[in-house]
Amino acid sequence: MLSTTTAIVEGRPVQTYLGIVTGEVIVGANLFRDLFASVRDIVGGRSGSYEDVLARARKQALGEMEAKAAELGGNAVIGVDIDYEVLGANGSMLMVSTSGTAVVL
């Protein structure tokens, strides 16, 4: 499944527009990961544990969106948008949402 942020795929015209598809993933923060991220913030550097969680959540949300496009008979999603939102008490959860237009190229 091809997913792109652009509205067109060069050399592959859209034959059919199938509608908007979405994917959403909500992940909770882990107490130990928070503790180690705080230590890393004090001493400097990147928080690899948070980066890993974010990458997995983004991949899952894109996969969910692509699966919905496939259910509609699509072979691509164009105009993809990825959004991140902090949710819950004290920002204890992160939502990754994706949306785009399912198409047949």
Image (spheres, rainbow, N blue to C red):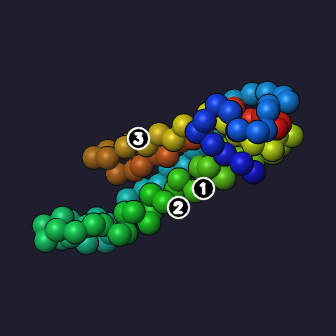
In the foreground, 41 or 3: 3
What residue lies at 83% left-to-right and 36% top-to-bottom? Answer: 104
Structural distance between the alpha carbons of marks 2 and 1: 6 Å
Structural distance between the alpha carbons of marks 2 and 3: 15 Å
What residue lies at 13% left-to-right and 71% top-to-bottom? Answer: 43
According to the picture, the residue beneath numbered tag 3 turns out to be 85
Name the image quarter holding the C terminus: top right
Q: Secondary structure at mark 2?
A: helix
Marks 1 and 3: CB-CB under 8 Å? no
Kind of residue indicated by mark 3: Glu
Structural crowding at the residue carrying mark 2, measured as other residues with C-alpha within 10 Å and reported as few (<14), some (14–19) or many (≥20): some
Give the image location of residue 18, x and y in percent.
Answer: 80, 29
- How many numbered discs sit on the rendered protein? 3
The answer to whether 90 appears left or right of 88 in the picture is: left
What residue lies at 43% left-to-right and 43% top-to-bottom? Answer: 84
Would you say residue 96 is visible in this rendering? yes
Q: Secondary structure at mark 3?
A: strand
Kind of residue indicated by mark 2: Arg
According to the picture, the residue beneath numbered tag 1 turns out to be 60
Marks 2 and 1: CB-CB under 8 Å? yes
Would you say residue 99 is visible in this rendering? no
Whichever of callouts 1 and 3 sits on the residue coming sooner in the sequence is 1
The answer to whether 66 appears left or right of 83 in the picture is: right
* Numbered badge on residue 56: 2
Give the image location of residue 55, x and y in percent.
Answer: 48, 60
30 versus 3 height, above or below: below
Kind of residue indicated by mark 1: Gln
